[in-house]
Image: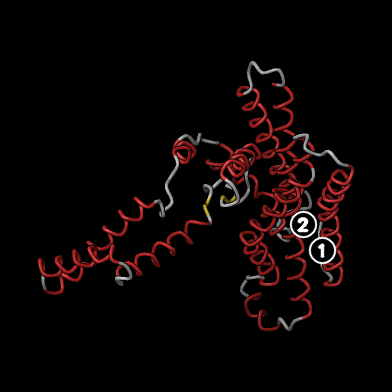
Amino acid sequence: VRHERRPREQLLRARSIEDKNGNGVERGSAHGGARVDDVGDEKMRCGAGASSRLGGDDEDDDGGVDDAHRAVKAFGGASSARATASFVTRAVTEAEKADGILPKREPEDDDETDGKEFDIFRDSALRYMGYANEVGESFVAWVPAWGVPATYGVAATYVLMDTVDKGLKRWKKAEGEEDQAKQAVTVALDTVTWQMLASVFWPGSFIRVVVATTNLALAKADVSAFDQLAAQGLDVERLLPTLMGLAAIPFIVKPIDHTIDAAADLSFSKALKGEMKEPQEWAVGAGVIGACLALPPILFSLAGAINDAAGVVVG
C-alpha cells in the first residue's frame, strides 16, 4: 500500500491544519492523520512532575502521598500495590489536567477525524493502479516489449482520474464563489503535477535502476550454483531481479513522497497558490521543478547503461 502517496487536495487541507495549529503538527497523509510532536515531551514532563510530587518535595503534595498510604492499608497484600499505583495515577492525572499540563484535545481535531469523506482513489482498490508501472518495471524480463509502457498507461490513467475527481470536488465546494473555476483548475494542476512525479516517473525510474543493478550483479557473479535450479525450470537470473524490484517498492514510497512534497512547496504548488512574489522565489522554484523533471530521464539512462554493462537487452 502506498503510505504517503496522496491526492493533492488532501495535502492542501493537511497544510492548512499545519498553518492553524503551528509547528507541532506533522503534515497529514492519505493514510493517517496529523501527529503532534510535542505530546511525547508533555507526557515526559507530566511523569517528571508526578515523580517530584510523590517524593514529597512540597507541603501541598503530602496529601496525595497520605491518600496513597491509606489506599495501601485499605487493600493490603499484592493487590494493594496495584491499587496504590492506580489510585496515585488517577490522582496525578486529575491534578495535571487541572493545572493545564496535559495536552487538551481541541474540538477541531474530532471534526478532522470524524468528518473525513471516503476517497475512492485513496480508500479503495483503485489506489493499486498507481503501482502498475513499478510492478511493470520489476517484471520487465517476463513481459513483451509493449508490457512496461502499458503499465505506465495504467498508472497515468489513475493519475488523470484522480485529477478530474479532485478538480470536480473543488468546483462543487467553491460553488457560488467568484474564483470557482480558478480554484478547480489550481487543484487539478497541483494534483496532476504531484502525482505524475511521485506516483509515476520517479518510482518507475528508481525501480528500473534497482532491476538493472541486480542484472549487473548477477552478470559479474558466479551463478553456477543456479544451474541445477535452471535445469528444473527455475530461472533464478530472471526471477531475482524481479523480486528485488518488487521488494524495493515499499522502501522508496515515503522518501519520494516527502521529497516531492518539499519540492512542491518551493515550486509549482507555491506558484499555483500565487505565493511567489520575489524574483528569487521564481528562480528557486524553476530550479527545483527542473531538477524534479530531469531526475527520471537521468535514472532511465543510468539503468540503460547498467543493463548494457550486464549484457542485458531490454525491450
Let me know if residue 2 appears in the view: no
| x then y, percent, for residue 174 | 64, 22
Graded by Cα atoms within 10 Å as few (under 14), some (14 to 19) or many (20 or more), the crowding at tag 1 reads: many
Q: Nearer the viewer, residue 62 or 175?
A: 62
| x then y, percent, for residue 150 | 74, 45
Residue 205 tag number: 2
CA separation in Å, label 1 and label 2: 8 Å
Above/below status of 256 relative to 238: above
Q: Pick whichever of labels 1 and 2 is earlier in the sequence.
A: 2
* Left or right: 245 as drawn, with respect to 289: left
Outermost residue, top side: 176
Q: Secondary structure at mark 1?
A: helix
Quarter occupied by the C terminus: bottom right
Which residue is rendered at x = 74% and y = 28% of the image? Answer: 185
Which residue is rendered at x = 56% and y = 52% of the image? Answer: 24
* Left or right: 108 as drawn, with respect to 278: left
The image quarter containing residue 71 is: bottom left
Q: Amino acid at mark 1?
A: Ala
Above/below status of 274 relative to 79: above
| x then y, percent, for residue 126 | 58, 41
| x then y, percent, for residue 227 | 67, 80
The image quarter containing residue 298 is: bottom right
Q: Amino acid at mark 2?
A: Ser
Graded by Cα atoms within 10 Å as few (under 14), some (14 to 19) or many (20 or more), the crowding at tag 2 reads: many
Q: Nearer the viewer, residue 305 or 229?
A: 305
| Label 1 with label 2: CB-CB less than 8 Å | yes
Above/below status of 29 relative to 43: above
Which residue is rendered at x = 34% and y = 50% of the image? Answer: 98
Which residue is rendered at x = 24% and y = 63% of the image? Answer: 64
Q: Which residue is mark 1?
A: 303
